[in-house]
Image (cartoon, grey):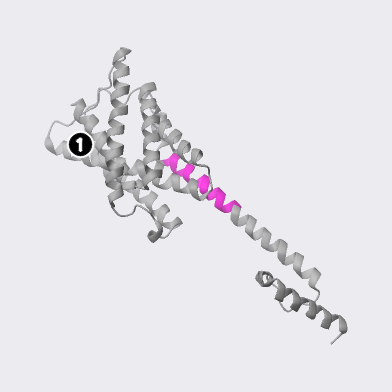
Amino acid sequence: MSNFGTRSNYIEMKLFQNFGFWNSFPGFRGKTGLLPVFPRAYFETNRVLEQARIHREMKTLLEPLILYFVLFFPAVLSFGDPVSDAVFSPAGEFNRIFFYNVPSLALIWYLVFMAKPVKQLAGRYFRIKDLFAFVISLPALILISFSISLASNLMNMPAQTLPVPAHPAGWILLCLSCLSTGYLEESYFRFYLLNRLEEAGSAVGIRVLSPTLLFAVCHIYEGPLGLLNSILAALILSFVYTKYRSLHGIALAHGAYNFIVYLLSG
């Protein structure tokens, strides 16, 4: 063996003793010609890490936007007021529940489970914190709606009328529709989107404002006061979720609030 090879192996051995983490570089151990091998392995590792970072960031930002435009953005394209003067349709509510809400909810939860193990998902089971979140959220949503309704009356703005069922079976179907809608929207805007932004290292303000703005945009068809109601409600729900990590509490409060609005309209 040449003196150069012996000396190179000796230097390599000392480097491994002092910097054991260099073992992670592919092709480094047992090689002579230290200088040509190290830069190649180092830059290859950096390239792989950079590609992984870009892929993670694209998934964090692109996947939620695609999901939003597929599931919620069609409401933005609604013109006028599609709710007023409409007739309650049991068949329409049935289709909404089982052919839109349930499949959309299944898709969101599938993506959540794929991104993180089930055991690590806070809020997957009902906890005492969910009761606290419900008790805080529901009165807050009702207070916001009452205040905006009062302001609407003071400004002599026309009140929005909602189609209500004429039979008890229709009310049961409407209750299921409100509940599934509450779970669908909270699963995406809070449970899914807030967690994705948190994993991306976004600031607290970004994590709260981004879901709030997206939630408000898909309710823009309700008019200026409806848009304001959506913004304030989303801020409250985002705050409660951030505080308690409770999906069930805010989803049940959201669904109960929607149902109460229909009851008052009836």
The residue sitting at 34% across, 43% down in the picture is 184
* Residue 243 position by quadrant: top left
Query: Does 123 sit left or right of 18 as displayed?
Result: left
Residue 237 image point, x, y percent? 36, 38
SS assignment for the magenta stretch, majority: helix
Residues rendered magenta in the picture: 54-70
Q: Is residue 75 above or below residue 204?
A: above
Foreground of the two, 252 or 58: 252
Residue 60 appears in the picture as rendered: yes
Residue 49 image point, x, y percent? 63, 58
Residue 251 appears in the picture as rendered: no
Query: Does 236 sit left or right of 210 as displayed?
Result: left
> Quick one: quadrant of the C terminus?
top left
Foreground of the two, 7 or 45: 7
Q: Is residue 64 magenta?
A: yes
Q: Amino acid at mark 1?
A: Pro
